[in-house]
Amino acid sequence: MEKSHTHSTVSVLIADDHDLVRDALAQALSFDKRFSVTTADSYMAALAAISKLGKVDVLLLDIVMPGMNGLKSIEDFVKVNADGAVVVFSGNIAPDFITQALALGARGFIPKTLPLKSLATAIHLIASGQIFVPFVAYSPPKEPEIEDLERLSLKELRILNHVSDGLTNKEIAWKVDVAEVTVKMHMRSICTKLKAKNRAHAAIIAAQNGLLLHNTF
């Protein structure tokens, strides 16, 4: 594991066993003073890095590394890096692959073909609480059906917008002037209607179906 120190406010762990890709990416990000960069080349090395640091703001996770159990390993890192974001970093841009990753708790997907100049922007968006998936790498899921989307209430749509902005249930409750437990009830209803695995998955489905109308209500 290698580490480079900067005076940045965003900590990034690049977990990838391809030396050239990992090191080139780490070097490029290290030139940007907004980032501190750590690298790992295996499942165990990534876990050790997070344990040592406490957490990282953004973990770029290659699914195919020594010790990994495919997509199932995403859940391990989501738990270990609970206060940070786990982002799949892969050359596989199959829609089903990306959808499964998001359903397992990933906060986004960054294809290995993403230009370096766009990478810093993507990482900052994710660190701020946004979910990042390039539209060129993701197709809308076939579900839910249109009638399910139309059944969302205005309050549920408002809550979905705030979820996509990275707000917590407590912050959303303050925004829409309801109790936090009410927000949780609405989120359960939203996930049921959208057939979403979790709040992040629901926000992705909403975005792909044009349900996010920021700054309109």
Image (cartoon, helix red, strand yellow):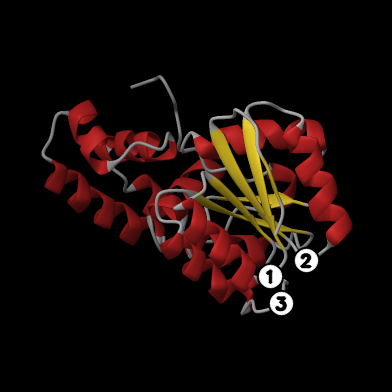
Q: CA distance from mark 1 to mark 3?
A: 5 Å
For label 1, the SS is loop
Q: CA distance from mark 2 to mark 3?
A: 8 Å
Please say if 64 is above or below 38.
below
Q: Position of residue 180 (x, y in %)?
A: 15, 42
The image quadrant that residue 178 belongs to is: top left
The dot on residue 42 is: 1
122 vs 1, nearest the viewer: 1
Q: Are marks 1 and 3 in contact (CB under 8 Å)?
A: yes
36 vs 178, nearest the viewer: 36
Q: Residue at x 48, y 61 (%)?
A: 51
Q: Which residue is mark 3?
A: 66
Which three-letter amino acid code belongs to the residue tagged 2? Asp
Q: CA distance from mark 1 to mark 2?
A: 6 Å
Q: Quadrant of the N terminus?
A: bottom right
Q: Are marks 2 and 3 in contact (CB under 8 Å)?
A: yes
Label 2: how many Cα within 10 Å (few below 14, some 14–19, many 20+): some
Q: Residue at x 28, y 35 (%)?
A: 154
